Amino acid sequence: MTRRQKTFRALETGDGSDGRWAAYAQPLWPLAEAWLTEEGRTEAGAQDARKLFEQHMPELVPVLDRLAAQLDRPEATTFLTLAALRPFFSGCTQIGSEGELLRNYDFAPDDCEGTIVRSHFLRPVIGMQEAAWGLLDGMNDAGLAVSLTFGGRFVHGPGFAIPIVLRYLLETCTTVDEAVARLGSLPIAIPQNVTLVDATRSRTVFVGPDIPLTEAPDTCAANHQHLPVPEDQ
């Protein structure tokens, strides 16, 4: 058996204005830039991504602009919307109950950014960072925790990559019910399962580009939803 080692880092970024976030994010740019779709590299595609972000995540627009300015790249704003990215699929497993959320990362160590970030963009949030400022999971100062897994179906549509959605929920919501209501209004690019926990509630929901938000029968998720997986998978 080959043993592989993964080194995780911890980072505090504050509100993203003092250079700490930029010092971390700038070296990631060659990889990040490769995630952009061909459409996202066009002026029209960039405008569409910006409009989608402004429409659905207006509270984070000042943070988006502040962070993009520090990257000083022509496509930085488009990338940071996470609304013009190539689809990516990876596995996880999670389970929640009132006040507790457990999860693992069922994918190669090299596919995990491996950075635990504490930030204060709109409010204190801590979580496992992905795609420069998105989150694979995290918790805010109100005690709301969220986590994601892939939904298991290889479909793709217009909408956000799920890491920025988790960031948005933790920046703007305080309870599970509030976060689920907000999540139901957001366009999601690929099928995802989201588990949400606060001190008194826990829920898992299925979301994706081709389904409405659907509650799971149990507060847990691996990499499938309520719909049958196609035969070719």
Image: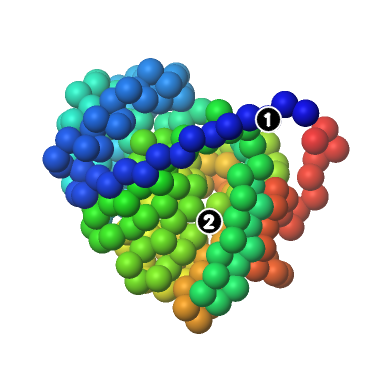
Q: Position of residue 145 (x, y in %)?
A: 46, 64
Closer to the camera, 209 or 85?
Answer: 85
Q: Is residue 85 visible?
A: yes
Q: Position of residue 227 (x, y in %)?
A: 75, 53
Say which mark, if any, is on residue 147.
Answer: 2
For image coordinates 70% across by 48% down, the residue present is 223
Closer to the camera, 63 or 213?
Answer: 63
Q: Residues within 10 Å of mark 2 (few under 14, many from 20)?
A: many
For image coordinates 36% across by 36% down, the residue present is 132
Would residue 129 be found to the left or right of residue 121 on screen?
right
Tell me the quarter of the picture where residue 89 sits.
top right
Q: Position of residue 113 (x, y in %)?
A: 47, 35
Q: Is residue 178 visible?
A: no
- Mark 1 highlights which residue? 3
Q: Residues within 10 Å of mark 1 (few under 14, many from 20)?
A: few
Q: Is residue 219 depicted above or below 83 in this figure?
A: below
